[in-house]
Image (cartoon, rainbow, N blue to C red):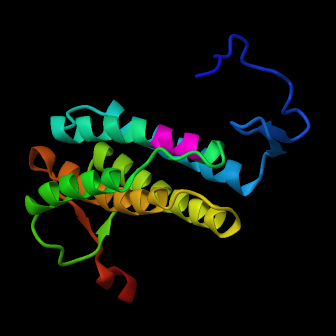
Amino acid sequence: MGYRLSKIYTRKGDKGTTGLGNNTRVAKDHIRVEAYGTVDELNSAIGLILATNNIPQKIQETLIKVQHELFNLGGELCIPGMTMLEEQHTKNLETILDELNAELPPLEDFILPGGNIAAAHCHLARTICRRTERRVVSLMLEEEINQHGISYLNRLSDLLFVMARVLARQNGGQEVIWQHEINAK
């Protein structure tokens, strides 16, 4: 696996470039850097969910696994031609999504982000996940990438929405329902 940095700064990026995993240098605003940087942001947002108290064990275990898979996706995007995510990773998310969603009442209204701190963090991660998906699609339109990353992100945003619903209902809590009548006044 190469070497680990013992010195954090190298000064190589001081002129606005960064190194990809294959030692190619590109501008720091290159779409590939934007894509894997947004994956990193998503992973950090999931860390916020995990840092809150009283996360159910199934959600906690799933999110820890997701963090590792997102790190792999970031690696894929950082090293052109690298493939780590497979269709099975998306199917695994679907299985958990179906299990969690089966315990929830059907949606009848739009839900606003909130409910409690864990649910709010989950909604934030969901919106970052959607942005991450858009960045990866932008990269896909420019360069060849592993298509499984896009389906994985799409399903992950759905899973984060369902997890937010579960978390909002913990300890007798409830989801925040959008009230369209407020806008009509």
Q: Quadrant of the N terminus?
A: top right
Instruction: Give the residue furthest to the right.
Output: 15
Q: Quadrant of the C terminus?
A: bottom left
Residues drawn in magenta = 70-76
Instruction: Give the residue furthest to the top.
Output: 6
Q: Residue at x 39, y 83 (%)?
A: 183
Q: Quadrant of residue 165?
A: bottom left
In magenta stretch: residue 127: no
Up-down: is 74 above or below 138?
A: above
Give x and y (percent) for residue 28: 78, 45
Q: Residue at x 25, y 51 (%)?
A: 92
In magenta stretch: residue 75: yes
Task: Using residue 59 as the reference point, say whether residue 154 is left or right of it.
Answer: right
Q: Residue at x 14, y 46 (%)?
A: 170
Decide whether the magenta segment is chiefly helix, strand or loop.
Answer: helix
Q: Depth check: give the residue in front, 59 or 117.
A: 59
Up-down: is 10 above or below 20?
A: above
Q: Is residue 42 visible?
A: yes
Q: Depth check: give the residue in front, 178 or 15.
A: 15
How many marks are shown on the rendered structure?
Answer: 0
Up-down: is 132 above or below 181?
A: above
Give x and y (percent) for residue 162: 24, 58
Q: Residue at x 41, y 41 (%)?
A: 69
Task: Using residue 127 as the reference point, say whether residue 168 is left or right of it.
Answer: left
Task: Using residue 87 as the reference point, say whether residue 5 is left or right of it.
Answer: right
Q: Depth check: give the residue in front, 181 or 94.
A: 94
Q: Quadrant of residue 111?
A: bottom left
Up-down: is 93 above or below 184?
A: above
Give x and y (percent) for residue 95: 19, 55
Give x and y (percent) for residue 2: 64, 20
Q: Is residue 185 visible?
A: no
Q: Depth check: give the residue in front, 18 or 163.
A: 18
